[in-house]
Image (spheres, rainbow, N blue to C red):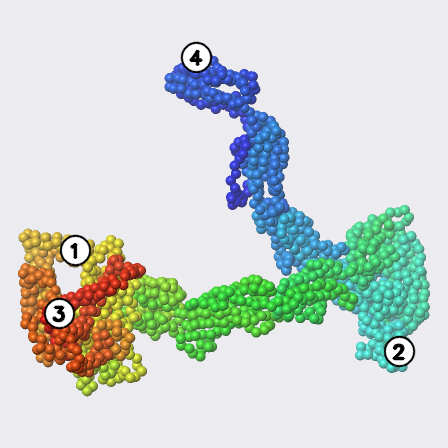
Amino acid sequence: MLADFPVNSLSDRIQWEPYKTHGKVSGMHRSEDPPKKRAPKHSCFLGVETCAELVWEGWELGGEYTKSLILKNVHGKLQKLTFRPPASKFFNTLFPQTIILSPGTSFSLPISFRPLQKCEYVDNIEFRCKEGTFQVSLRAVMLCHALELPDSVQLPPCAVQHSSSANFLFRNTSKLQTGFQWMVEPPFEISPVSGLLEPGEGRKVTVTFKPQEALVYQTEASCTFGDNGESSCTMLLRGLSKYPHLQIISPGQEEGCGLLEFGSIAIGSSLEKHFEIYNPSLVSTSFSLTRLRKAALMESVFQCDVHEGHVASHSVLKVSVCFTPLTVDSTSMEYFSLTCPGAVSRDLLKVTGSCIGPVVSLSSSVVDFGCVEEGVEAMRIIHIINSSSVLAHYQFDMDPGNHSVFTLDQPSGTLPANSSLSLHLRFRPHHPITYYKRPACLILHREPLFLDLIGTCHSELLKPAILHPRHLYVYRLNLLRGLTCYPPDILSAMLAEHKLQLDENGALLFQEDSSEDTFLSKLPLSKRSAMEEYFHNNSTNEAEVDAHESGDPNCFPMHHVTVRPSELCFNAGPASRSVSITNHTKGKLTLLWTPPADSPFSITPLTCDLSPLKSTAFRVTYTPKQHNVFNAAQLECFALYKVLRDHRQTEDRTLCPPWCLTVRVSAHSFQPGNEHFIPCFSLQHPQVMFPALSQVCYRTVLLQNTGNLPIIFRLDPEECPAVCVLPPSGLVPPGSHQIFTLRSTPAEDHPASLPLTLQLNASPKHTQKLNVVSVVEQLRMVLEGDGTLFFRPTAMGSCSKRSLRVRNLSRVPVNFYWRVCGSDQKALSVQPDSGMLQPNEFQVQTWSFTPLEEKIHSMKATLNFWPVQTPDCKKSRLSIKVVGLAAKGSIQADCSVLDLGEVLVGGCKSFEIPLMNSGCSAISFSLTVLQSITAPHFSEEVLQDPSALEIDTMKATIPACCRLLIRTTVRPARRARYCWTIRYHILNASGLVVGEPCSLCQVQAEGVYPTLEVTDVRSSGSMEGLSKLQLWRLFSLDSLNTYLRSDPSPPELTYRVPTRHSLSRCPPIFTSTMLDFNFSAAPLGADPSNVLLMFENTGSIHVEWSFLLPEDQQIELEYWAESGEFTPTELHQMKVQDNRLFSISPRTGKLQPGQQRAVQLSYRHDFAGIYRLPVLLKLSHGREILLNFVGVTVEKDRRYIHIPSNRHVFAPVAVGGFYPPKQVYELYNGGALPLRYHVDISPLEQLQKDNFNHPVLQCLNPDGEVQPGHTVTLDWVFSPLEAKTYSVDIPIYVLEGDSMLVTFEGYGFDQRDSVPFQFHDGYPAVPSTQKVALPGQVAFLSEERVSFGDIPVCSRSTHILFLTNVSHSDKILYSWKLKEQDDKQAVDIHPVSGSLAAGESAFCILTIYTSGSPTFYQQDLICEITLEEALAQYQRELQQWEVEKEREKHEFTITEKDLMQTVSQSKPTQVCIAEQKLPSETQKYKTLPPIRSSSTEAVLEWSNARQNRMVSKVQQQVGRRRPEPPRPVLLHLGVTARSHSLLEYQSHFPSHFNKHHIYRSLQPKLSQSRSNESKLSSTHMLPLTNGPERDILTYTLTSLLRSLLDDPQFHQALQNASAEPVPFFTQLRPASPLPFPTQSAPVAQAPCPVDNPCLDPQHTGRPVTVKNTQPQPEGEWRPNPHQELHQELRMKVQESIRRSPEFSDLMEEILLNTLQNLMMEAFLGELVLTARPRIIALPPCSASRNSFGSRRQSRGLVESERNRDQQHPLVTSPGPYRPTSVLLSNLESLEHSSSPHS
């Protein structure tokens, strides 16, 4: 790239618009080097190297320009070239000739160009050689302006209102000089904008990006170039701008700003801390860090060197702040504002710190030297202690030399932090008096400390009273009471006169009835502060002046003795000055000076007496000892009452200490013209800031002598009268310091800075200015905004909050409080409403608006504030206007009723309730929940359940026009229907409820446990022959589903999820629910018994289920922890689990609502016996059900009947019924051998005897045979005699097998009782459709169970179902296996067999025929499904096997090995045959089977069995196994029904009786059959059983049938019979009809007798009375007797036909067949049942004729159909029997006889 700019890291994220370059702009170069003159490009043509093109540039018209074309032979042999010159006249060359080039040689061919006009010329020269030809192009081009520049320039990302730049290079690629001019729109700028480029010159251009908004910018920069700007090009400029954002990262955070706390810092020290400025944005930005505005005279104690800077993207800048406090016990605050251009917000930093000073104390405030003899020195030690962490400067205001009787070894110094210093005090008295001095210990930045020094000096002549510390205490009390102005003798006299009294402390006190003047009886004075006392003690003014300065005349008492002046300066060499001392007491004083002998200062006189209220003068003389020195001293004068010099004249109780007067003197002895010493000093701090309050304030300043020469100083008090400084003059020794104490009372008229000059070394050259700020400023508090505070609309009773900043711009801390008008206090409040603000501090205050009525509130609040130091001063005020709108509010839920559906009991479900505030004001509310529970088993403890609904936020506030999501959790504790009503209360500002509760919404949920239900069951393997109903009963699936739907008990929820919790191999059971899973029985080695259970989650929550074996619940132990001793139960379970006899797949699963999962249970028949395994079905968080898996494996030679339960309950039967229903009981042969069973009916006979010889319970087939894997039904008739429960134990014996005892129970009920009649439901719990498919199943039934319900006897019911082949390629064959019942087919299906192509369905019609007796029908129809391909394969293999068998009959090989095997095999075979024959011979009594229509099937079975035995024999002989036919897949169709007698059905089902057709023609048969059965039972004919008789009969019938089948004549007769036409009624009449007169009598007697009731076929059960017709009178006209007789006979015949049972049966058959044919046509698609019927309108006449003809035609069809139906005999009507054929023949004869007369 030619552009020199940084790459944008975000450029790949921005989808820029495509850009195209315009104008004559070349492509971008990769280098920035200037273009060089490129050499012509050479090419090789046929071994000749030359230029491919010659180009002429920079030519002018009329000139001639020649170039040479170099031809070089690079071939290895000689080249001969000929050329054709250019065709145009503009290019010229040599005359055409042959050019000979030896290898490596070259030839130069000159070519000239002569232009005639300004245009582009193109031509070529063609060269020819032996190998071919090639051409060289000749081209003359015109020069033009061209620039080379990049297509686009990407500028670095830039912050708003910042700039970024990038450079790029563009070049003049032409050979012409060109000018350029750039034009670009903001925010881009290009520099330079214009210029001139020489040929080949490049120039660097800078693009500046200055965005004003955060956008993505794409702008085209246009550049015009050329001589006159005739050419132009564009370049795309891209830039990205974002808003800058900076954050202050500080250690602390305060509301609205960051916080940087320095804590407490010692005065005079500094601390530096840091904060960070972080740039989280994607662009770099500049910033400015400024201080917020503060008071003009406020000191700046925080220093920050960073004021502006630049922070790169995602970088941090560390900024340091230094804190140097100046004022002790003050808190300093400043605010720094961080702003950056283009940002939408700013950040604040609050910097705060406090200043602490030293804490200094003395070990003792009083030093008592006791009594010292004159001329003797006493010493005491005192400790000065600094208990703070701050360096302390101290100085005792005492003479550092020997001018005082009390001297200190270290009068000034420093105390390190937390240290102490021992000071030595010496006492050198000069006069025998009492001494007392109270020097001040000055502490820098602290109030001074006072030390009381007392001592007494005795001489040989004078011994004054000894002064003790207690006298000082009494003196101070007396001083406060104004009694120290009296001498001790007067006080003693007043005590004697009882004008004074002593208090408990020993001090004097006026009597209450004293008549002294008011001066003595005035109130006591208040106690003084240390700083005030220090200035008071050093003041030389009068008492009135002191009172003026203090502002309170009662603060200090009057001075007892004063000295004026208290300061003397001798700056002109030796001199003398006078000092005046005044006595203000009422006693005579003695004045004693104590100057040392070697002092340059002398006083005369040294002693004198001074009368009361008198003054005296003393002369102080300065006499220096040497020249050019500084001298300074504190001259002391002790004044005491004269009476105190003699102890005999004083009393101890009136003893008064003396007063010490001090005169400060300073002088120097420098001669005129001599230069004074240059002082080396340090002054902290030159600027003294007093508080802006109109009260006396004090400050201290430290002057340090850093040189090795003393310094004298002086402050002129007259220079600045507003400031008083102590000491005003003095001397600072080398290395020592002086503490100045300044006192001032700020005033408003003071200038901003008061000058105070410190003169050093008595030279005007050495001065130091002290700037003293002592100005009173008005307090200034600033409120945010313009003085008005607006609240958003607020609901009545609710509270709105606003924040308001209050800032103190004063230099003093301020106390404040808010005052709201009384009427507005209920609606408006502020927190905090009072407090203190440090200087320059702002505070965020929260205002609350709580309206109580709906209106616009306009309120006023006043801020009162005053300085903290002057609480009693006048308070300042600042007002603010507050406006708020009150409105009514309410909240609503988006949904009034929220139904959560089903929730797991013990679990939780969280959801959110959206609440909407549609009003204009925020609402504070609280929620309450009311719970109601609807449980299936309601109890009192349900009402005591805690609320199952938990709301995370019971109290909240919704802003106006906003939504709030309330997080709610439901935790149901039981299976019940929950309903929660959520109500809300409006809350006021204090959180109290306002108004009545309002309903918000209702939440509904149903606590459920995980539900699982078995919806289908299938079997395979050894259980394939069992029906679905049998499987349902074996596995107790009804009970299992019931238990799964019930609630778990608390012990079952001990472990909510599958857990290993037991150390035993037989884990404890926490459930009382147990069921048996019976896998039936099968022979040893049989296929496993497989059962597929379809589990479905019928609830609305997911369910996790697990089948837990005992090993799954056992905690795995180490080998050493096993006991090694096992119980028989444990050994049995270990055997079952180790051999995996029972298996479950899958063992665990998870089902979502509505999902299904098939679980396969398997039992392997590997070991004979009964095996059990407890398996726990565990639903997570739900039920536990113990499933006892039971499997029976039978030895192959054992006969075994499998009975699931030893107890069977019959259906209840009504007492007194005439036709008790026949019920069934099933026996299943679970062994490998057929067996015969026998039911012992002796208990039934005993039961019959016990019930008055009434057969309560009968077994209709007590004996029978069951094939292996098949089921036989025992028919029972239960006929109760009483309304009670009957129970009888009946043994069932198995021949050569085990017997069993079964308990049969039956319940008889009285119809008159409230016991309802039990209808037949056909086992509705058993699913009727298949939901789980077996592996490889290709055929499915539309219904697997058909229940016809309750039907009457002698009826027929049909049902339509479909058999579907779901395979896409295989064709199947199906065949139904039907069972017979009562020697006839009770259930029939059509078609019985057939084939189905892939995807085809079969239309099957299921029909049930009910017998004449009430019966429970329960049959299982089996449909065998075989793949046609598998059957064809079997037939091919069978054919090959038969061919091989036929071949082996003639070809065989005999070896010795074969002979041995044959002999060994023949013997056991004979033994087995003998064993098989033995049991049959032992059976003595055998009954022959009844001769029935299905005997052919028996013959076929016998022949098949015989053929199979022969085949097996052949297999044993030849050794090759016969191919086995393919095993069909079995489909079970269960059919259930219950038939009732007609009277019973009509009474219980009156609405359904007309829906059934009763076949009354079957009733005589039934009665006849019953009579035949009774006759058969009376003859005691033995049934035909297995034996020789049965074999003979079977063989005979088989031979007869085979002979008939082989007879061709029999076949022809059958064909002729089927082709024979249907006979008419005329062919059936008698050959010689009876004469009419003889027949008239019987015919006349044919009608029913008078009033003979009969059943009307059209109205069942309604009696119809038929009466005889009365003869007509003889006088009336009579028609022709033949015609009358003919008409009457026809009507009788028709009536007889209509009333005959055959006619009604025929009509039922026709209607049924018609409907079935229509359904079949609809199924095949030949008929569309939903098509709209077509209506054809015909003329009335034709319509009548057509209808008449149609009626005749239909009648003829009915008659013909009736004639064909001859297989059922006619049943007589309720008159004498007369065949219909006879009646019809008589009718026909009448027609023939009457025809001639007509």
Q: Is residue 1366 left or right of residue 194?
A: left
Q: Residue at x 59, y 72 (%)?
A: 994
Query: How many marks do you count on the picture?
Result: 4
Residue 97 - label: 4
Residue 1566 - label: none
Secondary structure of the residue carrying tag 3 is: loop
Quadrant of image for the N terminus: top right
Camera-near label (2 vs 1) is 1
- Which comes sooner in the sequence, label 4 or label 1? 4
Name the quadrant containing residue 997: bottom right
User: For the residues marked 2 and 1, what is the alpha-carbon distance in whole angstroms?
Assistant: 156 Å
Residue picked out by circle 2: 492
Amino acid type, residue under disc 3 in the picture: Ser
User: Where does the image place residue 1512, in percent across and percent down from the top left?
Assistant: 11, 60
Name the quadrant containing residue 1711: bottom left
Secondary structure of the residue carrying tag 4 is: loop
Residue picked out by circle 3: 1798
User: For the residues marked 2 and 3, what is the alpha-carbon distance in whole angstroms?
Assistant: 190 Å
Secondary structure of the residue carrying tag 2 is: helix
Q: Residue at x 64, y 49 (%)?
A: 340
Res. 1004 visible in picture: yes
User: For the residues marked 4 and 3, what is the alpha-carbon distance in whole angstroms?
Assistant: 145 Å
User: For the residues marked 4 and 1, what is the alpha-carbon distance in whole angstroms?
Assistant: 100 Å
Amino acid type, residue under disc 4 in the picture: Gln
Q: Are marks 4 and 2 in contact (CB under 8 Å)?
A: no
- Which comes sooner in the sequence, label 3 or label 1? 1
- Which comes sooner in the sequence, label 2 or label 3? 2
- Which comes sooner in the sequence, label 4 or label 2? 4
Residue picked out by circle 1: 1434
User: Where does the image place residue 1305, in percent across and percent down from the top left?
Assistant: 24, 79
Relative depth, front residue between 277 and 358: 277
Q: Where 1556 sits versus 392, above or below? A: below
